[in-house]
Amino acid sequence: MRALVWHGKNDVRVDTVEDPAIVNPRDVIIKVTSTAICGSDLHLYHGVIPTLRAGDILGHEFMGEVVETGAKQKKLRKGDRVVVPFVIACGECFFCRKLQYSACDNSNPVDKADMSEMLFGHQMSGIFGYSHLTGGYAGGQAEYVRVPFADVGPIAVPDDLEDDKVLFLSDILPTGWMAAENCEIEEGDTVAVWGCGPIGLFAVQSAFLMGAHKVIAIDHYPHRLELARKFGAEIINFKDVDVHAALVEMTGGIGPDAVIDAVGMESHGMAPDNILDWAEQTVMLETDRPHALRQAIHACRKGGRVSIPGVYGGFVNHFPIGAVMEKGLTIRTGQTHVQKYLPRLLDMIREGRIDTTFLISHRLPLEEAREGYRLFDEEQNETTKVVLKPGMEAANGR
Amino acid sequence: MHLGRHRGHRRDTWGANLGANLGVNWGEGSTVGTWGRQIRDHLAGGRHHRNDGHGHGNAVLVIAFCALAAGVAAFAITRGSSMRNNRRIDAGDAPRHTVRRRRLPGRHNAVHVGRTVTINRPRKYLFSFWRDFSRLPQFMENVQSITVIDDKRSRWVVKGPGEMDVTFETEITEEVPGEVIAWRSSDDADVKHSGRILFRDAPDGRGTEVEAAITYVPPGGRLGQLLAKLAGREPEIQTRRELKRFKQLMETGEIADAAPRPAARA
């Protein structure tokens, strides 16, 4: 089959690799119809997530048709059209029973689990195509994918909902939703969102659906800010405006009740602390650059909530723990418990309460995935989301 | 738990001695204290007289300070390692395998390793699965086969590098149904060890806490080294991984594997 393979820093190529097959009894094999490039794939692309190996197939946002089922697969049948959560979860362990699927104790193979146990104190769950810290599972930017524990994760979608409407159930929609849920929004609340990428934009929509009075979106790409405004957010371009001063002024001097860091470990901008982070990252004194998170904590009102859907992978310096303590902030974060949110979000898509298709700027054949990465990385203003279609080449007769 | 005084606990005192030595030396009036204060003063005041010609002085001071600190640390470590430890080890309520120095007195330098997992299954179910030793190779990757000889004894064939296998016998030394299985290897075993598996109810319906504790004698000599490799060079890693595989098999009915195809299994 053809698949997007990581060869090294900023080097991904579509290669011919061996087809996957059933390994465990609860597995299924999916023939991919649509798969997206995620902002967090860019962290892999840039080589800032450790334990990625040359030859790894990337991609954790995908959907398709079930073409093979394992001996003990009781839920899915051949021909089912499913969206697959990026988090692999067993459904049986302590964490899965608490619906904390991204904390699953059983989906990361034990030899791989040692790494995250050493790094974070406890092992991570398995994730598709996201380094060997999360199991080293082959990803979904491919023609076929092996999906373990397929009786827990994948959700069947009705035929009348096209791929573009439901694909984002795999990650970014539930991630934006959980980011807003972690804000514990109350009536009259203002939520500030750093980063108007797909997660930030879905967080904006979700915050309004959860009853936020006002949402303020922060970015420096005019087109992305414009999309946030379309959903009703007020916008701040951090290149032109002092973000902290603006947020305080726009909230009557109180500050945002909740803040969302949808930026993560590779903050943009020339803020002094971000430049210091660059230097410290270069000499390996820290791994992540949390400028947006620092600014969010600084801006959050006393007693407010800090939600972090942005990806962090290691260690940061100059963390404003004083502001967290003295202002009495609550921090909530985590990889998304995708499985928990799927039925409800699918219903909301079907009812037309959430719009997902607005996000897609590029639909490319899988063969052009390399170009898709380049666009998403280098032309972020225009490139809001790249969807790869393995079957597209044939459809276009190219 | 008091593990008594013995030579083996030397290393525990390194940290304490290092800390104590540094503590004394950091005191006011001592050499280190004076240097430290000077650096502190320079750093604090640096902003106000950045251009007063002290820049190079600061750098020299920092280098000198680092060199001195390294010297003090080296001295403390050397001194600590040559001292006898009279302190009793108090493990509190923690299991023996969490004591930093994993050696017991007079036991041929036995190493204690272990691990606890919570398995979301009933205690009796887990116990009876484990008690049928012939089923253990289902999740123990290094174990080729286990032949039950009689009620107490079984013969293990453990995978080694290349085509070589290691065979040894074990005998059950303690058994409380639903709670404990303890065993030890026969005296002529290549790799002498003893082990205990404890099963106890986890709180509030979380299932069962399963604790595996292995006491292992790393064999000496050239032949011993080879056999140690055959048995798995890192018994602690092996215990952890086998127990996690047991949990996976009990909870999910399978063992997680990222291989894209069965043939690609490691």
Image: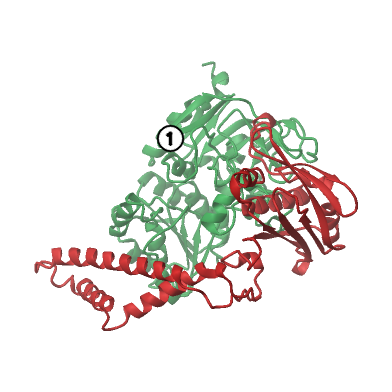
Question: In the rendering, what colour is chain A?
Answer: green
Of A201 and A368, which appears nearest the observer? A368
Say whether residue B252 is left or right of residue A280: right
**Which of the image's four quarters has the N terminus of chain B?**
bottom right
- Bin the neighbour count of mark 1 within 10 Å (Cα to Cα): few under 14, some 14-19, many 20 and up: some
Q: Position of residue B20 (x, y in %)?
A: 41, 77
Question: Relative to A222, is A212 above or below?
Answer: below
Let me know if residue A162 appears in the view: yes
Amino acid carrying label 1: it is Gly
Which residue reaches farthest right?
B151
Say whether residue A191 is left or right of residue B180: left
For label 1, the residue is A8
Question: Relative to B38, is A299 above or below?
Answer: above
Say whether residue A76 is left or right of residue A134: right
Of A326 and A129, which appears nearest the observer? A129
Of B53 and B23, which appears nearest the observer? B23
**Which of the image's four quarters has the C terminus of chain B?**
top right
Residue at screen point 76% across, 54% down: B187
Let me know if residue A352 appears in the view: no
Residue at screen point 63% across, 47% down: B224
Say which element carries label 1. Answer: strand
Of A343 and A309, which appears nearest the observer? A309
- Chain shaded red: B
Q: Position of residue B251 (x, y in %)?
A: 76, 52
Q: Position of residue B101 (x, y in %)?
A: 57, 65
Q: Quadrant of residue B27?
A: bottom left
Q: Position of residue A101 (x, y in %)?
A: 65, 53
Name the chain letter of the residue that bears numbered label 1.
Answer: A
